[in-house]
Amino acid sequence: MADPTPPPRAPVTIKKYANRRLYNTATSSYVTLDHLCQMVKDNVDFVVYDAKSGEDITRSVLTQIIVEEEGKGQNLLPINFLRQLISFYGDNLQVLLPRYLDQSMELFARNQEQMRTYMKETFGGMFPFARFEEMGKQNLALFQRAMTMFTPFKPEGKPAEPAPADGKEGQLDAVRSQVEALQRQIETLTRQIGEKNPK
Protein backbone atom coordinates (compact mmCIF):
# COMPACT_ATOMS: atom_id res chain seq x y z
CA MET A 1 0.00 0.00 0.00
CA ALA A 2 1.39 3.37 -1.01
CA ASP A 3 2.38 5.77 1.71
CA PRO A 4 -0.02 8.67 2.13
CA THR A 5 1.12 12.06 0.89
CA PRO A 6 3.11 13.73 3.66
CA PRO A 7 1.44 16.79 5.16
CA PRO A 8 2.84 20.16 4.05
CA ARG A 9 5.61 21.52 6.20
CA ALA A 10 4.77 24.30 8.60
CA PRO A 11 6.36 27.60 7.58
CA VAL A 12 9.65 28.53 9.22
CA THR A 13 9.23 31.12 11.96
CA ILE A 14 11.40 34.22 11.78
CA LYS A 15 11.44 36.67 14.68
CA LYS A 16 12.31 40.31 14.19
CA TYR A 17 13.75 42.11 17.19
CA ALA A 18 13.78 45.80 18.07
CA ASN A 19 17.37 46.11 16.83
CA ARG A 20 16.06 44.98 13.41
CA ARG A 21 17.87 41.65 13.65
CA LEU A 22 16.07 38.64 12.21
CA TYR A 23 16.24 35.30 14.01
CA ASN A 24 15.51 31.99 12.27
CA THR A 25 13.99 29.70 14.91
CA ALA A 26 14.49 26.61 12.71
CA THR A 27 18.26 27.01 12.50
CA SER A 28 18.68 28.96 15.77
CA SER A 29 20.69 31.62 13.98
CA TYR A 30 20.43 35.23 12.95
CA VAL A 31 19.72 35.87 9.28
CA THR A 32 19.64 38.82 6.90
CA LEU A 33 17.20 39.98 4.27
CA ASP A 34 19.48 38.33 1.70
CA HIS A 35 18.97 35.01 3.48
CA LEU A 36 15.19 35.47 3.41
CA CYS A 37 15.39 36.41 -0.28
CA GLN A 38 17.20 33.14 -0.99
CA MET A 39 14.61 31.21 1.06
CA VAL A 40 11.88 32.64 -1.17
CA LYS A 41 13.81 31.58 -4.29
CA ASP A 42 14.26 28.10 -2.76
CA ASN A 43 10.50 27.86 -2.11
CA VAL A 44 11.01 27.75 1.65
CA ASP A 45 7.87 29.16 3.24
CA PHE A 46 8.32 31.41 6.26
CA VAL A 47 6.44 33.87 8.42
CA VAL A 48 7.95 36.82 10.24
CA TYR A 49 6.71 37.92 13.65
CA ASP A 50 7.59 40.97 15.70
CA ALA A 51 9.44 39.45 18.67
CA LYS A 52 7.88 41.88 21.14
CA SER A 53 4.24 42.17 20.01
CA GLY A 54 3.86 38.85 18.20
CA GLU A 55 2.36 40.70 15.20
CA ASP A 56 2.69 39.03 11.80
CA ILE A 57 4.91 41.39 9.79
CA THR A 58 5.64 39.04 6.88
CA ARG A 59 4.13 41.41 4.30
CA SER A 60 6.26 44.38 5.34
CA VAL A 61 9.44 42.26 5.42
CA LEU A 62 8.75 40.85 1.94
CA THR A 63 8.13 44.40 0.72
CA GLN A 64 11.44 45.42 2.28
CA ILE A 65 13.19 42.61 0.36
CA ILE A 66 11.70 43.94 -2.89
CA VAL A 67 12.90 47.47 -2.06
CA GLU A 68 16.40 46.11 -1.34
CA GLU A 69 16.52 44.16 -4.62
CA GLU A 70 15.24 47.12 -6.62
CA GLY A 71 17.93 49.24 -4.94
CA LYS A 72 20.60 46.83 -6.19
CA GLY A 73 19.50 47.47 -9.77
CA GLN A 74 17.34 44.34 -10.06
CA ASN A 75 14.55 46.38 -11.60
CA LEU A 76 11.49 44.19 -12.09
CA LEU A 77 8.81 46.76 -11.34
CA PRO A 78 8.26 49.36 -14.10
CA ILE A 79 7.73 52.92 -12.88
CA ASN A 80 4.32 53.12 -14.56
CA PHE A 81 3.25 49.93 -12.80
CA LEU A 82 4.35 51.35 -9.43
CA ARG A 83 2.42 54.58 -10.06
CA GLN A 84 -0.72 52.65 -11.00
CA LEU A 85 -0.34 50.38 -8.00
CA ILE A 86 -0.07 53.35 -5.64
CA SER A 87 -3.14 54.94 -7.23
CA PHE A 88 -5.25 51.90 -6.26
CA TYR A 89 -4.73 52.46 -2.52
CA GLY A 90 -8.08 53.66 -1.18
CA ASP A 91 -9.78 53.00 -4.54
CA ASN A 92 -12.95 50.91 -4.70
CA LEU A 93 -11.04 48.30 -6.72
CA GLN A 94 -8.47 47.81 -3.96
CA VAL A 95 -10.29 44.74 -2.66
CA LEU A 96 -10.11 43.03 -6.08
CA LEU A 97 -6.58 43.95 -7.14
CA PRO A 98 -4.62 41.64 -4.77
CA ARG A 99 -6.46 38.54 -6.01
CA TYR A 100 -6.08 39.64 -9.63
CA LEU A 101 -2.33 40.20 -9.26
CA ASP A 102 -1.94 36.96 -7.31
CA GLN A 103 -3.66 34.90 -10.01
CA SER A 104 -1.71 36.62 -12.80
CA MET A 105 1.63 35.95 -11.08
CA GLU A 106 0.62 32.37 -10.29
CA LEU A 107 -0.14 31.72 -13.97
CA PHE A 108 3.13 33.33 -15.03
CA ALA A 109 5.11 31.26 -12.50
CA ARG A 110 3.30 28.06 -13.53
CA ASN A 111 4.30 28.57 -17.15
CA GLN A 112 7.78 30.00 -16.63
CA GLU A 113 9.66 26.84 -17.63
CA GLN A 114 7.81 26.65 -20.95
CA MET A 115 8.50 30.34 -21.52
CA ARG A 116 12.22 29.87 -20.82
CA THR A 117 12.36 26.91 -23.20
CA TYR A 118 10.54 28.90 -25.88
CA MET A 119 12.92 31.84 -25.51
CA LYS A 120 16.03 29.63 -25.60
CA GLU A 121 15.04 27.41 -28.52
CA THR A 122 13.42 30.02 -30.71
CA PHE A 123 15.46 33.12 -30.01
CA GLY A 124 18.70 31.77 -28.56
CA GLY A 125 18.04 33.59 -25.31
CA MET A 126 16.69 36.80 -26.85
CA PHE A 127 13.38 37.78 -25.28
CA PRO A 128 10.36 37.32 -27.62
CA PHE A 129 8.90 40.76 -26.99
CA ALA A 130 6.04 40.54 -29.46
CA ARG A 131 4.29 37.53 -27.90
CA PHE A 132 4.53 38.78 -24.34
CA GLU A 133 3.67 42.34 -25.28
CA GLU A 134 0.52 40.96 -26.90
CA MET A 135 -0.25 39.01 -23.70
CA GLY A 136 0.26 42.16 -21.65
CA LYS A 137 -2.06 44.19 -23.88
CA GLN A 138 -4.79 41.56 -23.59
CA ASN A 139 -4.27 41.51 -19.83
CA LEU A 140 -4.58 45.31 -19.61
CA ALA A 141 -7.64 45.43 -21.88
CA LEU A 142 -9.48 42.87 -19.75
CA PHE A 143 -8.64 44.71 -16.56
CA GLN A 144 -9.67 48.08 -17.98
CA ARG A 145 -13.04 46.63 -19.01
CA ALA A 146 -13.47 45.32 -15.49
CA MET A 147 -12.62 48.76 -14.04
CA THR A 148 -15.27 50.56 -16.08
CA MET A 149 -17.96 48.76 -14.07
CA PHE A 150 -16.75 50.53 -10.92
CA THR A 151 -16.39 54.05 -12.35
CA PRO A 152 -19.26 56.44 -13.11
CA PHE A 153 -17.80 57.55 -16.45
CA LYS A 154 -15.96 55.97 -19.33
CA PRO A 155 -12.50 57.34 -20.25
CA GLU A 156 -14.05 59.55 -22.99
CA GLY A 157 -16.28 61.19 -20.39
CA LYS A 158 -19.44 59.43 -21.54
CA PRO A 159 -21.70 57.87 -18.90
CA ALA A 160 -20.96 54.23 -18.30
CA GLU A 161 -23.54 51.62 -19.15
CA PRO A 162 -25.92 50.75 -16.29
CA ALA A 163 -24.68 48.14 -13.85
CA PRO A 164 -26.35 44.72 -13.90
CA ALA A 165 -29.64 44.46 -12.07
CA ASP A 166 -28.20 42.38 -9.27
CA GLY A 167 -25.81 45.20 -8.24
CA LYS A 168 -22.33 44.63 -6.84
CA GLU A 169 -22.67 40.85 -6.85
CA GLY A 170 -23.22 40.98 -10.59
CA GLN A 171 -20.22 43.29 -10.97
CA LEU A 172 -18.01 40.90 -9.03
CA ASP A 173 -19.20 38.01 -11.19
CA ALA A 174 -18.30 40.01 -14.28
CA VAL A 175 -14.81 40.72 -12.94
CA ARG A 176 -14.35 37.03 -12.14
CA SER A 177 -15.35 36.24 -15.72
CA GLN A 178 -12.75 38.71 -17.01
CA VAL A 179 -10.02 37.09 -14.89
CA GLU A 180 -11.05 33.61 -16.03
CA ALA A 181 -10.96 34.80 -19.66
CA LEU A 182 -7.43 36.11 -19.11
CA GLN A 183 -6.38 32.77 -17.61
CA ARG A 184 -7.74 30.94 -20.66
CA GLN A 185 -5.84 33.26 -23.01
CA ILE A 186 -2.56 32.72 -21.16
CA GLU A 187 -3.10 28.96 -21.14
CA THR A 188 -3.85 29.04 -24.89
CA LEU A 189 -0.67 31.00 -25.58
CA THR A 190 1.35 28.57 -23.46
CA ARG A 191 -0.15 25.61 -25.33
CA GLN A 192 0.73 27.25 -28.66
CA ILE A 193 4.29 27.75 -27.46
CA GLY A 194 4.47 24.07 -26.51
CA GLU A 195 3.09 22.96 -29.90
CA LYS A 196 5.63 25.06 -31.79
CA ASN A 197 8.47 23.77 -29.65
CA PRO A 198 7.83 20.06 -28.98
CA LYS A 199 10.37 18.35 -26.75
Image: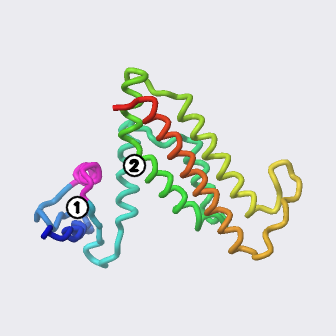
Whole-percent x and y of residue 106?
43, 53
Whole-percent x and y of residue 6?
19, 69
Whole-percent x and y of residue 87?
63, 55
Q: Main secondary structure of the magenta part?
A: helix
Q: Which residues are magenta?
A: 32-44
Apparent side of residue 28 relative to residue 53 in the rendered image (left or right): left
Residue at the spot 57% in from the left edge and 40% down from the top edge: 135
Mark number, residue 21: 1
Three-letter amino acid code of the residue under disc 2: Arg
The quarter of the image holding the N terminus is bottom left
Q: Is residue 102 magenta?
A: no
Figure check: 162 above or below 34: below
Three-letter amino acid code of the residue under disc 1: Arg
Figure check: 23 above or below 71: below
Apparent side of residue 193 relative to residue 46 in the rendered image (left or right): right
39 and 10: which is toward the camera: 10
The quarter of the image holding the C terminus is top left
As measured in the structure, the alpha-carbon distance from the residue carrying label 1 to the one carrying label 2 is: 34 Å
Residue at the spot 39% in from the left edge and 38% down from the top edge: 114
114 and 24: which is toward the camera: 114
> Within 10 Å of the Cα at label 1, are there few (<14), some (14-19), or many (20+) other Cα atoms?
few
Q: Is residue 35 magenta?
A: yes
Residue at the spot 71% in from the left edge and 71% down from the top edge: 170
- Outermost residue toward the top in this view: 124
First along the sequence among labels 1 and 2:
1
Mark number, residue 110: 2
